[in-house]
Amino acid sequence: MPLIHGDLEVEVVSGEDLVDQDNALFNIIPGDWSDVWVDVNLGTTNILQTRIRNNTISPIWNERVYLPVYQSADFLEVTVWDKDHLRSEMIGRGRVLVGDHDKAWRKDGPVFLDGGKGKINMKINYTPAAQARAESIEVPKGYYKMRKGGSLTLYQDANATKIPGIVGTSDGAFVAMAETIRRAKKFIYIAAWSLWTGTRLERDKDTLGELLKQKAAEGVRVLLLLWNEKFSAGLCAGLIGTFDEDTDRYFEKTGVHVQKARRTRTGSNFLRDKLVEVVWTHHQKMLVADDGGDDIVAFLGGLDLTAGRWDTPEHELFSTLLGEHRGDFHNGFIKVKESQGPREPWHDVHGRLTGQAAIDLLRNFEERWRKQASKNVHLLFPLSEEDLKPSSGPTGDVTWQIQVVRSIDKDSAEFDSSRVGLLDSAGGHLADTSLHTALVRLVRRAENFLYIESQYFIGSSQAWEKDQDCARNLVPLEIAERVVSKIRAGKEFRAYILLPMIPEGNPDEHIIRSSMKTILYYQHLTIQMMYKRIAAALQEVGSKNHPTDYLLILCLGKKESRTRVARSAGVETPRPGSEESKWRQRSRFLIYVHSKMALADDSHILMGSANLNQRSLDGIRDTELAVSACQVREGSNSHEEAVTDGVVRDFRKSLWAEHTTGLSQEEDDLADPASLAAVRRLKQLADDALETYVRDDSDSEPRSRFLRYPLDVSQDGTVKARPGMPNIPDFDIPAVGCRGLIPPTPSV
């Protein structure tokens, strides 16, 4: 059975002469024909499900999907169904044999259903991964095109400080956003999972709420599109803490227009549609505004404009409690006094765009506003293409290529009718699934190394040892495949994945505890699948190298000496035996990784709001937004070549310098992430740092905040809890997780 590994475009055009299920036996109601829809499967993977066409035996769909595939299969299976009130009944089934797995092929024409029950006209186009690898980073036939020009500024954490070993520093994401808001003369649009009006983007200046009210009073059109959390009112008020009700009340009669939007779904299943409102979210995090002139400035990434997100690369635990974090204290894991701490350090990645890609982000907001604030469409500031004069970006021989990619469906955006043909048919819904495709494309094109930071890492369940249907995104499988292909070719390649030590939540609350364990369980299945494949490849080529020489899973933690903690100015001394006293004695806390970023070869970066899990990458679950970007310069024969010594490389080096407090800039072994020396040195640093982190009697501060994720990987790829460390440090939660009360779908 051939492995179909590449990009597959499938279009269901129409049906002809389909057997009528409704009138096949009794012609009771004249004109009552079958209500038909089509399922297309490649092996065990459902790749396309059309919408229902009512009362017809000659339906026209013109629905397509463009998606990456990794599936062993001999044929595509096409099934036609008749939708009845209580269930669906199969009309017929047909097959299309796949072509060569290692060559591009196209098949257009009818697929005949068995038993002479009609035919489905289809168009199928396949491009093997090896061929796509030679193409650009652009997602083909994406809703938004790859844009040339403009600029992309990358930020680590909300506020900038000097990073050891790194020359220069930017203003920081929050300061840059505050400056953009102040300069705006026409409009300010914000789409947010959570927005807290008390956020001070600049610690010594106005709150975000005050700043936005001032701009509205100046006549600037200020529109806020907030996720309307199902449990933010009533008996469960404040369960998740998104502040949507508080924000709405704060801006009443101020000229700032707030639209709270539930993540709704319109379908034929009432209970499922209601469940969507509880489970899925609007997760985009973006700000777009005019720059005071004719240009547009946009921000997107992982940072929410809400409580607890302001942090610096120092990630202080105690010393800022009565300073920068007074009134903005957050710890989602434990209940401690704000004046005694520790706080929860927050690591994140964000970006600022100009140029045509920023206009695409503007259009994304407008599409969502038209759908989710349909009664207030008139509030959108009128902007035609002629009104917009995007920046061409810095002059010189280096140019940005930037593509906006999304996970979003028709229930969350009013798509441009002229681009509907570029959308996928996902579960009978039109959806933009380009974000998942862009991530897979980044992984497939990587030649030397991958560096990923993600809040969650779950996927490719079709390759797990069990529970194979819950999270079928391809990203983990593609990473493992890229490593395996390099091992077989005898070439160096590394993948570094940075995750939070544990999902955020207070484990003392039973439902949250169950969710945390469930997430870790599926994360463990994901990681073990990858290591098993890498171990098998090493055995196949006779290598004695260890699987962790190719794939390294890391987390972050901050250990502060007790002497340093004791010197923290003005911090209250906790009562002996209290929760605060216990944490003061430990003088450590995990650094929560909230980034959503993948980086390849110091040249290509994808960053935005999407985590590496099914929720974010599905297309019809959480609404997500990201950009895929690289810098290019003209090379030999006038061909564009990816820049490997530009902004993306500098950003990766700055991240590593933050996580090693400058060691990565000092040690030659860490200079080349693709080298065996680099991965082994980083393993050593991370192992030593983890051992120091968990020692209660230690008064040292390890320079590496990279910690080895507390799992043990054997030579054969088996992944277990680390010896002597069955649980996540400081939390009574098993490192490999376990099945909890929460079903998999909301968790993955």
Image (cartoon, rainbow, N blue to C red):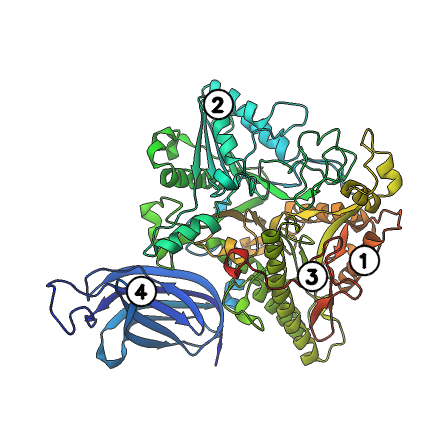
Of the two numbered discs 3 and 1 on the same chain, state the one appearing first in sequence.
Answer: 1
Q: Estimate the x, y position of residue 685 in percent, counting from the top left.
A: 81, 56
The reply, left or right, for residue 233 in relation to residue 564 is: left
**CB of mark 3 within 8 Å of CB of mark 1?**
no
Helix, strand or loop status at disc 4: strand
Q: Circle 2 is placed at which residue position? A: 185
The residue at 35%/76% (across/down) is 96
Which residue type does callout 2 highlight? Lys
Callout 1 environment at 10 Å: few (<14), some (14 to 19), or many (20+)?
A: some
Residue annotated with mark 3: 734
Q: In the image, is 36 to the left or to the right of 562?
A: left
Crowding at mark 3 (Cα within 10 Å: few <14, some 14-19, many 20+): some
Of mark 4 and mark 2, the one earlier in the sequence is 4
User: Which disc number belongs to residue 669?
Assistant: 1
Residue drawn at x 86%, y 36% is 566
Q: Say what secondary structure mark 3 lies in.
A: loop
Label 4 Cα neighbours within 10 Å, binned few <14 / some 14-19 / many ≥20 = many
Amino acid type assigned to the residue bearing label 1 in the image: Asp
- The location of residue 553, given as percent across then percent down, is 70, 60
Q: How far apart are marks 4 and 2 (CA)?
A: 47 Å
> Element under label 2?
loop
* Mark nearer the viewer, 3 or 1: 3
- Mark in front: 2 vs 3: 3
Q: How far apart are marks 3 and 1 (CA)?
A: 34 Å
Disc 3 from disc 4: Cα separation: 46 Å
Task: Please state which amino acid type lies under the numbered disc 3.
Answer: Pro
Q: Give the mark nearer the N terminus: 2 vs 3.
A: 2
Sooner in the amino-acid sequence: mark 2 or mark 1: 2
The picture places residue 209, in percent across and down from the top left corner, at: 55, 26
Q: What kind of element bears circle 1?
A: helix
User: Which residue lies under the disc numbered 4?
Assistant: 12
